[in-house]
Image: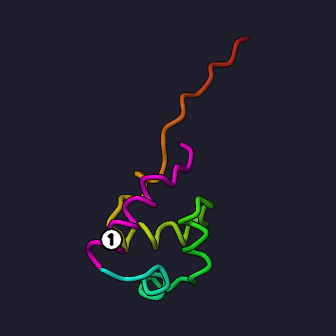
Amino acid sequence: MVYNGSKLIKQLRTKMLIEWNITLRQAAKKMGISFATLSRIENGSRPDVDTLATVCYFISLPIQDAFIPVKSKSKKN
């Protein structure tokens, strides 16, 4: 599995703008993470596991939805 933040970012923006009606700074405070960290995530940076779990929890996104499966390559002998 490979991290794919597009679904996370889309869900985050939906929660912030539509459901919560708050700014990115306010969302970071609500989640207990720094504004800089949340800003980096929104701009496409990959978060650490703890931060990813926190953000997913607050935006009601199953953590596995932040990943995409990768087909493994078969080894040739």
What residue is drawn where x is 33% and y is 66%? 14
Q: Quadrant of residue 59?
A: bottom left
- Residue 68 vs residue 39: left or right? left
Which color mode does the image show?
A: rainbow
Residue 37 higher or lower than 3, as above or below: below
The spot of residue 22 in percent (x, y) is 36, 83
From the viewer's side, name the closer residue of 14 and 69: 14
Q: Quadrant of residue 30?
A: bottom left
Report the magenta stretch's main SS: helix
**Residue at the limit of the structure toward the right, as seen here:** 77
Q: Is residue 3 magenta?
A: yes
From the viewer's side, name the closer residue of 47 and 49: 47
Residue 60 higher or lower than 27, as above or below: above
What residue is drawn where x is 41% and y is 66%? 56
Name the kind of residue labelled 1 in the image. Answer: Lys
What residue is drawn where x is 52% and y is 49%? 4
From the viewer's side, name the closer residue of 77 and 70: 70
- Residue 22 vs residue 9: left or right? left
- Residue 57 vs residue 1: left or right? left
The spot of residue 1 in percent (x, y) is 53, 42
**Residue at the limit of the structure toward the top, as seen here:** 77
What residue is drawn where x is 26% and y is 74%? 19
Residue 69 higher or lower than 28, as above or below: above
On-image quarter of the C terminus: top right
- Residue 10 vs residue 50: left or right? left
Q: Secondary structure at mark 1?
A: helix
Q: Which residue is mark 1?
A: 15
Circle 1 residues within 10 Å: few <14, some 14–19, many ≥20: some
Q: Report the label total.
A: 1
The spot of residue 73 in percent (x, y) is 62, 23
Magenta segment, which residues?
1-20
Q: Is residue 35 magenta?
A: no
